Image (tube, helix red, strand yellow):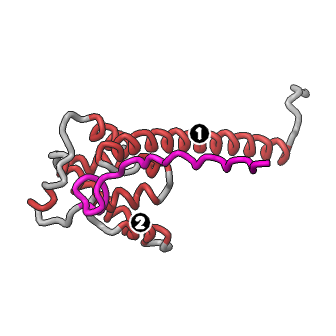
Amino acid sequence: MNYGYGNYGASGFLAAFFAIYVVVLGSILVLALVVYVLNGFAFMALFRKVGIEPWAAWVPYFNIWRILELGGQPGWISLVAFVPQVGGIVSVVFECIATYRISHAFRKGGEWVVLFIFLPFVWAWLLASDKETYEPGLFAQHGWSQPLVGHGSARGPYTPSTYPAPPAPPAPPAA
């Protein structure tokens, strides 16, 4: 008896595998884009509150550079993430140290580092929208170096520059 199922062999299997692969890959890309946008908006709000240029939240690795500097560490440590095998781990450890210091500047406890590890955009959003103020002077009370950017740093906070008006066009030659 023939039930009409046919024997598609390897071509049917490959088509099904390819379709599943495309759906899974597409879902991962959409999820990554959503997380990137959430991180961008949340860190932009946090950066604005602590006196760092808000556009830095949208630049990969540079936003980590700014987080490290806000935590009183040199920003170039974010480039260690490019070292194969151990670089990513070392970078995350220094990010956690910076996060701990930043959380203390907002008078928050160490449990906020756990929040940063699993949901960094929630961590940044809560600190940016919290009623507590950012107090970089608390760094000195713990014996830590001052932030390298933003309020409380030697450079001072980011202030948007106002560009002067362009010069007037030259007068036409007199005839």
Q: Quadrant of the N terminus?
A: top right
Left or right: 131 in relation to 28: left
Which of 82/166 is in front?
Answer: 166
Using the rendered image of the protein, determine whether residue 60 is visible from the camera's viewpoint: yes
Q: Residue at x 19, y 46 (%)?
A: 106
Using the rendered image of the protein, determine whether residue 97 is visible from the camera's viewpoint: no
Q: Amino acid at mark 2?
A: Ser
Q: Regarding mark 1 in the picture, which secondary structure is present there?
A: helix
Q: Regarding mark 2 in the picture, which secondary structure is present there?
A: helix
Question: How many numbered discs?
Answer: 2
Q: Residue 22: image x %, image y %?
A: 70, 43
Is residue 164 shown in magenta? yes
- Figure check: 159 above or below 5: below
The stretch in magenta equals: 147-175
Q: Residue 115: image x %, image y %?
A: 29, 45
Which of 21/52 is in front?
Answer: 52
Left or right: 154 in relation to 56: left
Left or right: 26 in relation to 79: right
Residue 30 is labelled as 1
Residue 78 is labelled as 2
When asked about the image quadrant of residue 87, the answer is: bottom left
When asked about the image quadrant of residue 143, the answer is: bottom left
Q: Residue at x 66, y 47 (%)?
A: 169
Q: Nearer the viewer, mark 1 or mark 2?
A: 2
Q: Residue at x 79, y 47 (%)?
A: 14
Residue 40 is labelled as none
Q: Amino acid at mark 1?
A: Val
